[in-house]
Image (cartoon, helix red, strand yellow):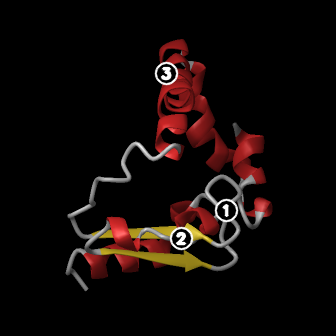
Amino acid sequence: IGRLMRWDSADASQWRERDLRCYTDVLRDPARARASVLLYRTFLLHEALPVLRGRYRATRLLVPTLVLAGGRDLTIPPALLRGYEPYADAMSVEVVPDVGHFLPEECPALVAARARAFFGRE
């Protein structure tokens, strides 16, 4: 897990061992590890392909939505977020350059500022 987190971060050196342990230690509990595996397995085996085939193409996202994406995210590249406009009434996407997949960890102040602004608490 630690290696994956470093791999999908724009700056792998930002991760200290004690920080990574916050994420990895909980997975030492077999029940938690199994739950994590099952969550991803369910998505990959049962949800990903139908989504890619357009399962929700006729559905509209009606709630206000803000998506923050890392410009260097290898898991969900910014290109995958293009073309949402016909399916979302009040959605905006902000790509944060030089950030990977873990935005709250890589740029916590920016994420907090965007959340405050989005929820009207500036």
Q: Secondary structure at mark 1?
A: loop
| Relative horizontal placement of residue 81, taking residue 100 as reference (left or right) | left
Quadrant assignment, res 1: top right
Please tell me how crowded label 2 is: few (under 14), some (14-19), or many (20+) other residues with Cα within 10 Å.
Answer: few
Pick the front one: 11 or 118: 118
Q: Earlier in the sequence, mark 2 or mark 3?
A: 3
**Amino acid type, label 1:** Asp
- Disc number lying in front (3 or 1): 1
Give the position of the C terminus as an image quadrant: bottom left
Residue 43 is labelled as none
Determine the CA span between mark 2 and mark 1.
Answer: 14 Å
**Residue 25 % position (x, y):** 59, 30
Q: Image point 53% across, 70% down: which residue?
A: 82
| Relative horizontal placement of residue 117, taking residue 84 as reference (left or right) | left
Identify residue for label 2: 82
Q: Residue furthest bottom?
A: 122
**Amino acid type, label 3:** Arg
Identify residue for label 3: 32
| Relative horizontal placement of residue 40, taking residue 56 as reference (left or right) | right
**Residue 105 % position (x, y):** 56, 61
Identify residue for label 1: 73
Determine the CA span between mark 2 and mark 3.
Answer: 34 Å
